[in-house]
Amino acid sequence: KFGTIKMPKSKSSFSARKHKQAAQGPASQHVRAGVQFNKDFGQHILKNPLVVDGIVNKAGVKSTDTVIEIGPGTGNLTVKLLEKAKEVIAFEIDTRLAAELEKRVSKTPFRSKLKLRLGDVLKNPLPQFDVCVANMPYQISSPFIFKILTHRPLFRCAVLMFQLEFSQRLVAKPGDKMYCRLSVNTQLLARVEMVMKVSKNNFRPPPKVESAVVRVEPRRPVPDIDLEEWDGLLRIAFTRKNKTLGGCFKAKGVVSLLESNYKTLHSKDKTHKHPEDFKKYIIDTLDEVGYTKKRSKQLAVADFLKLMNAFNAKGIHMK
């Protein structure tokens, strides 16, 4: 069973809100060479052809591939993809840039390969595809990475431009400063590597932060776990990543939630004996796997899987 990974409200819900407001309200725009760039849409056009070529090469696009591109802008990356792919399905939220892209591609022999889709990619279903390539609008980074990682059927790879800090979080390993719930959630479902760093001077207009390109390959087979419960486990464990797991799981609110879930699970079994001290029941389970004094920042994906299996075996569930 696969649930939906819920992203942190503090960041992703705000970002999605900002994205929506940008689509509805006046644009704050940057004008250059006759094209207005809407900063509310995160429009920073990649202008360095060497970086463009590097992204396309890392994607390993084949002549039989369907490629999706997010935020094609004026088409610097799109044109290169069209040269190699069977077709490119480009999602663009800005009608002005969509018109610019259509005009540019119409002058090439690849115009029939381009399928342009207007609208917010987060609100529209993705087609079946082999490769995803994008200079991402940075404010939709978190929800988009999980949109493609839970997309079925699986794609071959994605090569995506993100803010440098976001990229560092995606690829961080246990013990790294940047290691967080995003790292674990992503690495459960995919192999992730940073393939290049990109200076802000490679964009028009230049963003305020440095960027990086990440290559994402879905894991096969797909992990056979409930993603909603998995994310619930990580939310508890990463409440404070420097706190021990024993400290995180014996918090009053956490014990109350898990005990309520336990009672619901066993509500129809009149012979089942409920643990007298549920907090102790939780800590005893942590002790059995040796994680009571461990911190979430120290645990790899395999450790969290072991922990969830141990809890589930005792009838403890996160949802």
Image (spheres, rainbow, N blue to C red):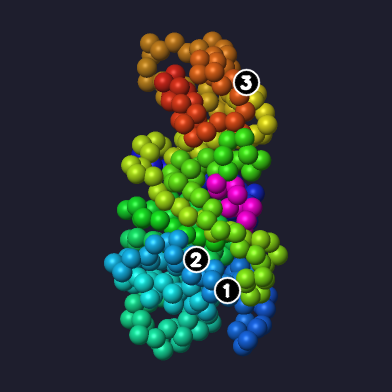
Residue 166 lies in the magenta stretch = yes
Q: Quadrant of the N terminus?
A: top left
Q: Position of residue 53 (x, y in %)?
A: 48, 70
Vertical relation: 118 (above or below) 255: below
Q: Residues within 10 Å of mark 2 (few under 14, many from 20)?
A: few
Q: Earlier in the sequence, mark 3 or mark 1?
A: 1
Rendered residue at 34%/61% (across/down) = 129
The location of residue 242, given as percent across then percent down, is: 68, 31
Q: Nearer the viewer, residue 113 or 318?
A: 113
Against 9, residue 213 (above or below) is below
Q: Is residue 185 visible?
A: yes
Q: Secondary structure at mark 1?
A: loop
Q: Which residues are magenta?
A: 163-171
- Residue 21 appearing in the image: no
Q: Amino acid at mark 1?
A: Asn
Residue 265 position by quadrant: top left
Q: Earlier in the sequence, mark 3 or mark 2?
A: 2
Dot label at residue 205: none
Which residue is tagged 2? Answer: 54
Q: Are marks 1 and 2 in contact (CB under 8 Å)?
A: no
Question: Label 3 vs label 1: CA separation?
Answer: 49 Å
Q: Which residue is mark 3?
A: 293
Quadrant in the rendering for residue 240: top right
Main structural element of the magenta stretch: helix, strand or loop?
Answer: helix
The amino acid type found where label 2 is placed reads Gly
Return the residue found at the far left: 64
Side of 284 where 59 appears, left or right = left
Mark 1 highlights which residue? 48
Q: Reading the chain from its start, which is encountered first: label 1 or label 2?
A: 1
Cβ atoms under marks 3 and 1 closer than 8 Å: no
Residue occupying the point 68% across, 61% down: 209
